[in-house]
Structure formats: C-alpha cells, structure tokens
Amino acid sequence: MTTIIDGNEIADSIQTDVRASVETLTDAGVRPGLATVLMSEDGASETYVSMKQRACEELGIEGSHHEISPDASADALFDRIDELNADPSVHGILVQMPVPDHVEKRAVLERIDPVKDVDGFHPENVGRLVAGNARYKPCTPHGVQKILAAEGIETSGKDAVVVGRSDIVGKPMANLLIQYGEGGNATATVCHSRTEDLAEKTRQADLLVAAAGVPEMIDGDMIKEGATVVDVGINRVDADNEKGYELVGDVEFESAKERAGAITPVPGGVGPLTIAMLMYNTVEAASLQSDVPIDLP
Ligand SMILES: Nc1nc(=O)c2c([nH]1)NC[C@@H]1CN(c3ccc(C(=O)N[C@@H](CCC(=O)O)C(=O)O)cc3)C=[N+]21
C-alpha cells in the first residue's frame, strides 16, 4: 500500500510547537516579528505572501507586509530592507522571490541582515549550512526533512536523488541529505536539465525529491518500486474551473503512486511545511536576537 503523506497534518503539529515557543518569547516580553516584502504583481506570489501573513496571525507572530511597486528602483527595495534591518521589532525578513529583472537578486539577498534572514539565502547562511553549522535551514528542504522524520523514513545509507539544482531547494536539499545526523547520511545525486538519461538516475533512488519546476516531468516509470517520492513542484496549469488554473507537482501523481512506497501530493504536501518552517525560523530568529531561549524540536 502506498502512503499518501499528509503535509497539512505534519505542518499543524510543527505549528503547535512553534506556538508554544511564541508564548515563551511573548511571556518574556519579546513578540516575534516577521516582515514580508513583495515587489511583484504576480498572482501566485501574492497568494503565497498572504498565506505567510495568515500563518503569522494564527501563531501570534507580529506580521508586517511591505509592497513595493515592481516599477520602482532597486534602491526603493534596498532602502526598505535597511529600515527593516534596523527595526528591533522585526526579527525575520522575507523578500518574496522572484524580484523584477532590473533588481539584482544576489544584491537583495546580501542586503538582508543575516541574523534576520529567515529564508536562509544570505551567503553567510548558505556557507554555514554547507559547513554543517546552519543558523536557519532553508524552509522547503527543512520541511522535507520534517516530513521524512514524521513518517519514520530513514535516509542514512540510502540513495537520494534530487531533481533540480536551485539555490532555494535543490542545492540546500542535497547538502542536508549528505550531512551527519538525522535526515542526513544519504548518498545524494543532483540531477538537472543537462543530466543525460535522467530516468536511469531517478530509478536508483530510494528517496526521490522532485524540485525542477516542470509540471509532471517525473512519471511512474522513472520511480523505483517502494521509493519515497517528495514532490516540491507547485505549478499552476490552465484548467477549466472558476480559478482558471489547477496546481500540479513535478510528479505525475497517478502513475507515481502506483510505484512509490510513500508520496507527497500537490497541494497538501511540501507547501504547508514551507510555511511552517518559515514560522519556525522566525521564532528561532527572535530567540537569537533577544537571548530568550526556546526549545524547538
Ligand atoms: N523569499 C522567498 N521565500 C519563499 O519561501 C518563497 C519565495 N520567496 N517565493 C515563492 C516560493 C513558493 N513558496 C510556497 C510556499 C507555500 C506554498 C503552499 O503552501 N502551497 C499550498 C497550496 C497553495 C495554493 O492553493 O496556491 C500547498 O502546496 O498545499 C506554496 C509555495 C514559497 N516561496
């Protein structure tokens, strides 16, 4: 029997722990604060940012949202980041990606105070992660590790294949998988658009993480019998419904579930964990910046 992993349930349980830490901090006079910054009019980006703000509200985190016109200068964004860096009530800053083409993404990530970088994208935090001394683990790969832990899926000694080499998912995911400790000790292979014979690689995987951003590119034929399949893709494809689109993953769910031992759906798989781990990193950030200890698993 294939296990269909319930990401919402795992995210809820993490949020319960996060809520307890929010209370610890608030009782000590520190209300955790997260600032989201959006420089885009893209519908999906607006949806994701509002989901993050809603999660803040539910957990007692002070959320503030900042919109900057996509036509504004890069300096308008940098000035706002500087203000948020200097604001002691803001412990975490998230600049929603993508930013417009005239704004250099790298410069944005480097502008955020690394202690407030709850995405974990600043080069200092990337370096710390690779060195095995992470400050904030990037939310999506960290969420994948939480899914594996919640389902009791062993990674140690296993063949893990990550499809996609992005800075926000593929690279940090592979790094976490090869690290010492729980959720690590795997043999990780990273595949991408130039990989020759992708299916030959994915069929070796005990754990397959699909994070290429290509709708339904992984089908059942590419999956080893009994493998764990984690689908990170969240793709909007045109559909004949009132929204005009539906969400599909990077995995063709119907054929994949016939082969997988366990599989995450889209929606309701990794997505909710990404939000939960952002909240987790925000309370970590508040604790670090205030020296009030918290106890998060
Ligand atoms: N600086 C930055 N940090 C991010 O973490 C970041 C970002 N930029 N840019 C865009 C991506 C995308 N992302 C999602 C998070 C949760 C869901 C999620 O919860 N999805 C629901 C469905 C949502 C729906 O209905 O549209 C689900 O999968 O069940 C989706 C997408 C965070 N991102």
Image: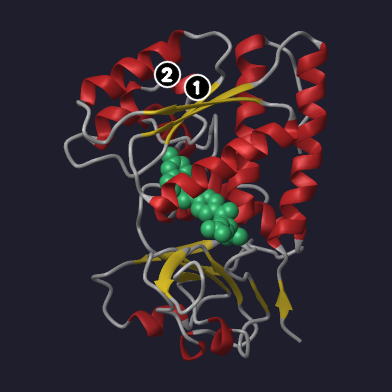
Between 213 and 45, the residue placed more toward the observer is 45
Residue projecting furthest to the front: 242
Q: Is residue 199 above or below residue 246?
A: below
Q: Is residue 125 above or below residue 175?
A: above
Which residue in the structure is indicated by mark 2?
113
Image spot of residue 273 (x, y percent): 63, 51
Q: Who's the residue at 75% across and 44% down the image?
A: 14
Which residue in the structure is indicated by mark 1?
116
Disc 1 marks which amino acid?
Answer: Lys
- Specify whether tag 2 is near ligand 1 (CB below 8 Å): no
Q: Is residue 261 above or below residue 7?
A: below
Specify the quadrant of the image occupied by residue 61.
top right
Disc 2 marks which amino acid?
Answer: Asp
Residue 242 falls left or right of residue 226: left
Give the class, few, some or many, for how many residues have Cα within 10 Å of label 2's Cα (few <14, many ≥20): some
Image spot of residue 269 (x, y percent): 63, 63
CB within 8 Å, label 1 to label 2: yes
